[in-house]
């Protein structure tokens, strides 16, 4: 029996499995389905070859024997027409099955910390001037964005990136937490989203969906439409008569010539619509497929259903309207670009009629598109966060509060590190003790701890779980100064760049939101005396403006700043040990000031005579 489609269902007990078990069970199920489809596809190939050989055999008989009717050729012809759509359906099902297998295998690789090959890393969202993006591996290869995103559309990626770059209000964070938690078990929805074709250029489509739809519709005069439609109707029997050889081809020039003045009168509208919608049909088709998923899914959470309700407009579902727009856009592109279809489109008046239909669409749905686009992007970003929640079973749900200003993390670790190699520490910042100054030797873990705090706070902004046993935090405005370098092109020295970055962090305290600052090797690049005075001034300015934060240094002179802070700061440190010429670190944060430096020992280990 030929099998053209296989739609395996998720096991009823799947929700009781852990992420790895669910992914692996689904891969096994899909591989079994793919094997059946491959067998069916091979049988279809054999049948089509057999039909072709039969057609050749019957054709040779018909040619050699005039008494044999050519009607016998209907048998292989009919068989071919029946097999063609069945074979095509089988191939489509097989491709979808293979894509679903690739999706779940990618999820397994993510659990194994082998996700840095994922194609979308968000590097285009990077911004060196942003308060924290460049310092916390938010975008680019090996980034938090690359780890988390499962979005398919351009607006979905934009929305998730926006969450990672902005500080939301408490209400928004709580909404994201609630919605992503409700989407956490929706593995089937994630799989269906992954099957939507990717690699779509959204630049043109975003321009279309954010600019063209907002402009007032420009309808074509009714008399031009009627005239163009009438000439198009006349052209159809003329074209059929030409194909049958009943009339000469030259008569087709008549409707083309008569359509000319109508095209001339509407050329500006045609050109304007075409330039706005040129090559946008692939993105629109993808948009429609994603819309269908979110429109039809039976969400149980009330806030998700509220978001789902945004997809209706004028009694027509968003996916239906966008599919119509995609179809009209595709026909318009063919009418203007396809050299074989363009003459027919000209004769039938399709350029005029399609332009008016597009303008009518804009009048009906132009004001709905922005809402549809925003809701789709929200769903995609939420699914990415939900996937992160689903896979990070050892993480905790953070408590975000505005009742008290603090950052209190128990056993916090870096979310981009493998769980088996991630060392966790406790960090507590309050209004009573708003500063932790961390000393320690090179490579001991100071910078990693700062990035652990900052990256987990970005996860809080997204409504995700965090790598900690427990985390309570205020929704801070974050400012960092870590990866700073000079610039030959801009004529900036290292010290100038450091000061410029520190000023931007201090300036954040002029905003209403309380600042959490993370400063790594503060004022590195100048002499010890100036560093001591400058660092104390910057830190005191931040603390006096009610900011909380952490500062690292390997210059032990800077640890004396704590003594002048009237109990509002503490010293903590990381240690290293050297045994038998080998340096080791335990990456555990301890109270007090580090007592030794490893700089000379490290230089000796590398073969320098010091």
Image: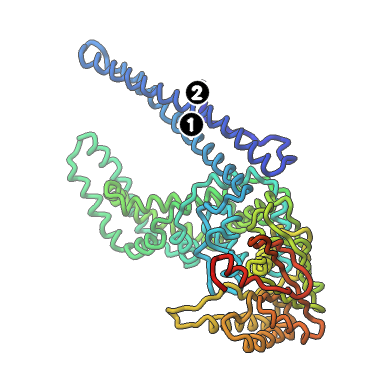
Q: Which mark is residue 90?
A: 1
Q: Is residue 247 above or below residue 479?
A: above
- Mark 2 falls on what kind of element? loop
Q: Position of residue 214 (x, y in %)?
A: 50, 66
Residue placed most toward the observer, 536 or 217: 536
What is the quadrant of residue 512 in the picture?
bottom right
Pointer 2: residues within 10 angstroms few (<14), some, or many (20+)?
A: some
- Mark 1 falls on what kind of element? helix
Q: Which mark is residue 423?
A: none
Residue placed most toward the observer, 273 or 64: 64
State the residue at coordinates (69%, 58%): 464
Residue placed most toward the observer, 256 or 54: 54
Q: Is residue 138 above or below residue 74?
A: below
Residue 461 horizontal side relative to residue 114, left or right: right
Q: Is residue 307 visible?
A: yes
Residue 159 horizontal side relative to residue 433, left or right: left
Residue 292 horizontal side relative to residue 455, left or right: left
What is the quadrant of residue 7 in the picture?
top right
**Sooner in the amino-acid sequence: mark 1 or mark 2:** 2
Q: Is residue 176 visible?
A: no
Pointers 1 and 2 in contact (C-beta within 8 Å): yes
Residue 299 horizontal side relative to residue 282, left or right: right
Q: Position of residue 513 (x, y in %)?
A: 70, 77
Q: Position of residue 500 (x, y in %)?
A: 56, 83
Residue placed most toward the observer, 132 or 222: 132
Q: Which mark is residue 2?
A: 2
């Amino acid at each position: 029996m030929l099998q053209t489609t296989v739609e395996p269902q998720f096991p009823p007990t799947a929700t009781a499995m852990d992420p790895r078990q669910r992914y692996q069970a689904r891969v096994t199920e899909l591989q079994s389905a793919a094997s059946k489809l491959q067998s069916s596809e091979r049988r279809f190939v054999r049948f089509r070859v057999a039909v072709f050989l039969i057609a050749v055999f019957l054709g040779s008989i018909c040619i050699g024997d005039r008494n044999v009717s050519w009607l016998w050729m209907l048998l292989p012809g009919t068989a071919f027409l029946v097999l063609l759509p069945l074979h095509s359906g089988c191939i489509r099902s097989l491709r979808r099955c293979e894509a679903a297998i690739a999706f779940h295998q990618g999820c397994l690789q993510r659990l194994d910390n082998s996700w840095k090959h994922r194609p979308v890393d968000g590097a285009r969202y990077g911004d060196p001037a942003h308060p924290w993006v460049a310092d916390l591996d938010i975008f680019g290869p090996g980034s938090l964005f690359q780890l988390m995103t499962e979005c398919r559309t351009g607006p979905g990626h934009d929305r998730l990136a926006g969450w990672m770059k902005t500080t939301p209000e408490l209400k928004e964070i709580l909404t994201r937490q609630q919605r992503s938690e409700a989407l956490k078990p929706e593995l089937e929805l994630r799989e269906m989203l992954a099957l939507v074709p990717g690699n779509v250029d959204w630049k043109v489509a975003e321009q279309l969906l954010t600019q063209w739809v907002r402009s007032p519709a420009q309808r074509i005069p009714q008399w031009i439409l009627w005239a163009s439609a009438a000439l198009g109707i006349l052209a159809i029997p003329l074209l059929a008569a030409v194909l049958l050889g009943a009339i000469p081809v030259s008569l087709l020039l008549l409707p083309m010539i008569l359509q000319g003045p109508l095209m001339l009168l509407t050329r500006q509208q045609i050109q304007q619509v075409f330039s706005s919608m040129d090559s946008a049909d692939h993105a629109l088709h993808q948009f429609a497929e994603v819309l269908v998923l979110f429109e039809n899914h039976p969400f149980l959470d009330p806030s998700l259903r509220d978001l789902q309700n945004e997809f209706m407009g004028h009694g027509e579902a968003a996916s239906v309207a966008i599919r119509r727009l995609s179809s009209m856009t595709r026909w318009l592109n063919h009418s203007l670009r396809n050299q074989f279809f363009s003459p027919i489109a000209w004769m039938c008046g399709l350029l005029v009629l399609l332009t008016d239909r597009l303008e009518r669409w804009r009048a009906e749905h132009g004001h709905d598109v922005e809402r549809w686009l925003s809701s789709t992007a929200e769903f995609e970003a939420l699914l990415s966060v939900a996937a992160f929640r689903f896979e990070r079973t050892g993480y905790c749900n953070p408590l975000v509060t505005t009742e008290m200003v603090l950052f209190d993390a128990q056993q916090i670790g870096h979310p981009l590190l493998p769980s088996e190699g991630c060392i966790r520490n406790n960090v507590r910042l309050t209004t009573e003790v708003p500063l932790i100054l961390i000393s320690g030797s090179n490579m001991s873990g100071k910078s990693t701890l700062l990035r652990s705090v900052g990256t987990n706070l970005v996860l809080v902004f997204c409504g995700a779980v965090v790598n900690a046993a427990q985390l309570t935090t205020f929704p801070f405005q974050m400012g960092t100064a870590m990866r700073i370098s000079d610039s030959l092109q801009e004529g900036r020295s290292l010290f100038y760049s450091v000061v410029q970055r520190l000023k931007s962090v201090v300036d954040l305290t002029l905003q209403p939101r309380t600042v959490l600052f993370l400063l790594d090797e503060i004022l590195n690049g100048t002499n010890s005396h100036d560093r001591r005075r400058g660092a104390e001034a910057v830190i005191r300015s931040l603390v006096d403006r009610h900011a909380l934060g952490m500062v690292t240094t390997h210059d032990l002179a800077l640890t004396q700043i704590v003594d002048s802070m009237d109990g509002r700061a503490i010293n903590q440190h990381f240690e290293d040990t050297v045994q038998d010429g080998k340096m080791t670190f335990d990456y555990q944060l301890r109270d007090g000031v580090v007592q030794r430096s490893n700089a000379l020992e490290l230089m000796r280990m590398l073969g320098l005579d010091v």
